[in-house]
Image (tube, rainbow, N blue to C red):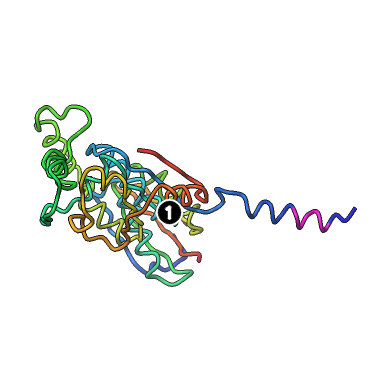
């Protein structure tokens, strides 16, 4: 038996094993302020730790990427309705609990400022500087009638499908769903 | 007394998680390999986070000094 050959074969197998990369893939499903904050804190923290970070924004999460300053026309009736019902951008998100008609969310934002906890604006800015990639689910955007032109300006952002997320997730050491 | 020179002081006083390590990771790339950054933090979480960050990024925390309400980290860029 050729031990060296066997070792080489095993080594090739180990190298090809999934989850080996120092990379974080995260599904950002929720459009709640608290969950978006958690997502962005983990994402910027991971990037600071030297990890490659890819965020896959889908479903309610995509509304957080809308730019309140941008207006697009040509939407269907349902698209317009979704546009009105969903928060227009990350600063319009609500807490998942204790929103209390806006009072709870405003109170938390005040507390965050007082305790110098980074806001979503600051976290997105840090994420951009650290090279965190944002992928937006094409189907979610299409379903809710959102357009690429109404999304925020962000350096590493593209519109993708589920296969793209799975491709990233497969080679990542850490995968999360928030 | 410490026997190393400090190349840069990074003030993270008042910042909360994850900003101290975000700032540290940005600043460490601006000094040369082998140089030491002094990082000031008031976040108690830094005591666990900075060593964990260093281990993950391959840098070294030479020491930390705890004063009332302030932690000083001495971090050497290793690679």
Tell me the quarter of the picture where residue A117 sits: top left
- Residue at 20% x, 46% y: name it: A145
Direction from residue A165 to residue B14 in the image, left or right: left
For numbered disc 1, what is the local secondary structure? Answer: loop
> Residue B78, percent across and down?
50, 64
Residue with the most extreme right position: A1
Instruction: Return the residue at label 1.
Output: A49
For disc 1, the neighbor class at 10 Å (few under 14, some 14 to 19, many from 20) is: many
Q: How would you classify the magenta stretch by its main secondary structure? A: helix
Q: How many marks?
A: 1
Q: Residue at x 39, y 53 (%)?
A: A54
In the picture, the quarter occupied by the C terminus of chain A is top left
At 19% from the left and 46% from the top, the residue drawn is A90
Q: Could you say which is closer to the camera, residue B38 or residue B77? A: B77
Q: Report the span colored magenta.
A: A4-9
User: Is residue A8 found inside the magenta-colored segment of the image?
Assistant: yes
Q: Say if the magenta span includes residue B50.
A: no
- For this rendering, which residue is in front, A95 or A167? A167
Q: Quadrant of residue B44?
A: top left
Residue A23 placement, left or right of A85: right
Chain letter of the residue beneath label 1 in the structure image: A
> Could you say where residue A148 lies in the image, as x and y percent from the top left?
23, 56
Q: Would you say A94 lies left or right of A7 here?
A: left
- Position of residue A40 in the picture relative to residue A108 (left or right): right
Name the one closer to the observer, A147 or A93: A147
Residue at image x 30%, y 52%?
Answer: B19
Residue A175 spot, x, y in % from top left:
45, 43
């Amino acid at each position: 038996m050729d031990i060296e050959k066997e070792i080489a074969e095993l080594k090739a197998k180990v190298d090809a094993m999934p989850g080996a990369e120092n990379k974080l893939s995260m599904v950002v499903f929720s459009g709640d302020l608290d969950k978006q904050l958690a997502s962005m804190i983990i994402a910027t923290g991971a990037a600071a730790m030297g990890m490659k970070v890819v965020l896959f924004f889908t479903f309610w999460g995509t509304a957080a990427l809308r730019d309140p300053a941008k207006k697009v026309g040509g939407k269907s009736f349902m698209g317009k309705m979704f546009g009105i019902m969903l928060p227009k951008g990350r600063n319009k998100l609500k807490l998942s609990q204790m929103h209390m008609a806006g009072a709870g969310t405003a109170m938390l934002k005040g507390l965050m400022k007082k305790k110098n906890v980074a806001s979503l604006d600051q976290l997105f800015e840090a994420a951009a500087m650290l090279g965190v990639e944002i992928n937006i689910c094409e189907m979610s955007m299409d379903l809710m009638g959102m357009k690429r032109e109404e999304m925020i300006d962000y350096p590493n952002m593209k519109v993708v499908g589920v296969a793209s997320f799975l491709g990233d997730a497969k080679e990542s050491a850490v995968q999360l769903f928030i | 007394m410490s026997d190393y020179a400090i190349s840069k002081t990074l003030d993270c006083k008042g910042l909360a998680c994850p900003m101290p390590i975000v700032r540290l990771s940005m600043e460490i790339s601006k000094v040369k390999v082998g140089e030491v950054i002094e990082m000031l933090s008031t976040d108690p979480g830094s005591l666990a986070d900075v060593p964990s960050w260093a281990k993950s990024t391959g840098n070294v925390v030479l020491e930390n000094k705890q004063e009332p309400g302030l932690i000083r980290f001495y971090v050497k860029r290793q690679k």
